[in-house]
Amino acid sequence: MKENFYVYILANKTHEVIYTGVTSDLVKRIWQHKNKIADGFTSKYNVNKLVFYEVHDNAESAIKREKNIKGWKRDWKDQLIEKENPRWDDLYESITS
């Protein structure tokens, strides 16, 4: 079975703070963020709303894309999110059903 990798962006409730990450298990990783399983940036700033994600065929591609997005200006990240999710809805429910 082929494994997918995901680049994702989380936001806090007011969208003032965002976080970009990469994982091979999107549902599990977002659940961890939502439940503050790991100490760190997302837990400290309540960044747990999945507002964007994309699928990659391999880890190298996903990691490269994550690093690329992390280097972007905030406005570019907002535009990427709003292109797919203009209302900044929490997409977590859509990936768990």
Image: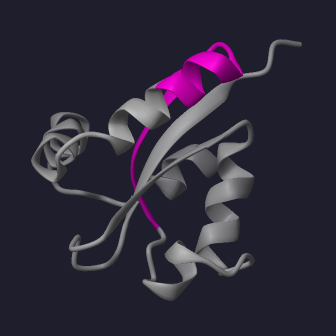
Identify the coloring.
Answer: one colour
Residue 31 location in percent, x, y?
Answer: 67, 65
In screen coordinates, is 52 left or right of 44? left
Residue 10 seen by the camera: yes
Q: Is residue 63 magenta?
A: yes
Residue 96, compared with residue 63, is above or below; it is below
Give the percent coordinates (x, y) of residue 23.
67, 41
Quarter of the rendering containing residue 34 = bottom right
Q: Quadrant location of the N terminus?
A: top right
Looking at the image, the residue that sits furthest to the right is 1
Q: Nearer the viewer, residue 35 or 70?
A: 70
Among the 4 quarters of the image, the one containing residue 25: top right
In the rendered image, residue 84 lying in the magenta stretch gets the answer: no
Residue beneath the point at 64% across and 13% down: 57
Measured from the top left, where is residue 79 in percent x and y?
13, 40
Rendered image quadrant of residue 32: bottom right
Looking at the image, which residue is at 67% across and 79% down?
35
Q: Magenta stretch?
A: 49-64
Residue at point 56%, 81% (across, down): 43
